[in-house]
Image (cartoon, helix red, strand yellow):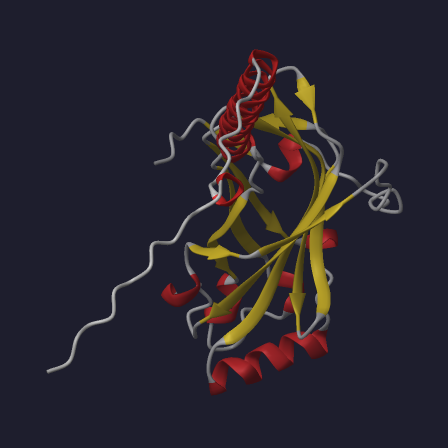
Amino acid sequence: MQHSRPELPVNRRDQDRPVRRHHSASYYAHWVKESLTTRMSKLICSIFLGLLAIVGLITFILWLSLRPHRPRIFLNDFSIPALGHGDGGGGPENAHISFRVTARNSNQGIGIYYDASQVTVYYREKSIGGYQVSTTFYQQPKNSTLFASTLSGSSLTLTESQWKQMLHDRSRGPVIFRVELVSTIRFKISSWNSKHHRFHANCPAGLGQDGKLLPIYMDKRISIQAEFLLQDLTMFSNLSSPITYRNLQLATANIKLS
């Protein structure tokens, strides 16, 4: 029979016990002060970042609502009646071109000044006629401006060879033209006017055998290109016979756009 050995008692000295530190009142006061300072700094930073986010959101909304959009261009009509005649209608000297182009201002509360406008008709990338609008006019917000005119006589530089080529194209399919609208515009927001912008729109026009615009080209929105200008343009100063509103039959129609 085995006897268990008695365990000897272990004596612990006082230095082996963990020492509880007693901090003074000034220590706790300093700790509380630092904690309050940190919390206050975090609160101020949170408030500042929140205000900054709100200001940024308001600025973004205002930018979206006040950002001006370029005019929207549509080709409404284009025709050469003489092209629909079987014999060619007596040649280019008896021909005339009628067209209607609409510029829509879709901006809400933003008007547009048109300082100079030029309408040119191209056939096979060669100009065959055009007109200039040299008078500045103002387009109200949510309105449409109609450019409508008839090119004939001196305003229509159509040669005999070009006319024969048109008749040849007519026998093979649609006769393709290009109506180019170039203008210098300024946006008006309240009492502030922007600097000049130049834009040009290229409107393709395909005519059938009757000399009228094919439905596929009618009232189609045209993409335009815009360019920012630092100063007024003199791009139309070399034209010898500028026309006015009455000559071009340009009218601003008070059409409410959806």
Q: Is residue 25 above or below residue 135?
A: above
The image shows residue 102 at horizontal and vertical percentages of: 50, 44
Q: Quadrant of residue 189?
A: top right
The image quadrant where one finds the C terminus is top left
Residue drawn 47% across the image and 41% down it: 17
Q: Is residue 90 above or below residue 77?
A: below
Q: Is residue 227 above or below residue 1?
A: above
Q: Looking at this view, is 64 or 193 the one in front?
A: 64
Judge whether residue 189 can be spotted in this image: yes
The image shows residue 237 at horizontal and vertical percentages of: 87, 42
Q: Looking at this view, is 37 or 164 the one in front?
A: 37
Residue drawn 67% across the image and 75% down it: 124
The image shows residue 181 at horizontal and vertical percentages of: 64, 51
Disc tally is 0
Residue drawn 63% across the image and 24% down it: 188
Residue drawn 68% across the image and 76% down it: 162
Residue sticking out furthest to the right: 238
Q: Looking at this view, is 65 or 214 the one in front?
A: 65
Q: Quadrant of residue 88?
A: bottom right
Residue sticking out furthest to the left: 1
Judge whether residue 132 can be spotted in this image: no
- Residue 217 appears left or right of 115: left
The image shows residue 106 at horizontal and vertical percentages of: 47, 36
- Residue 104 appears left or right of 218: right
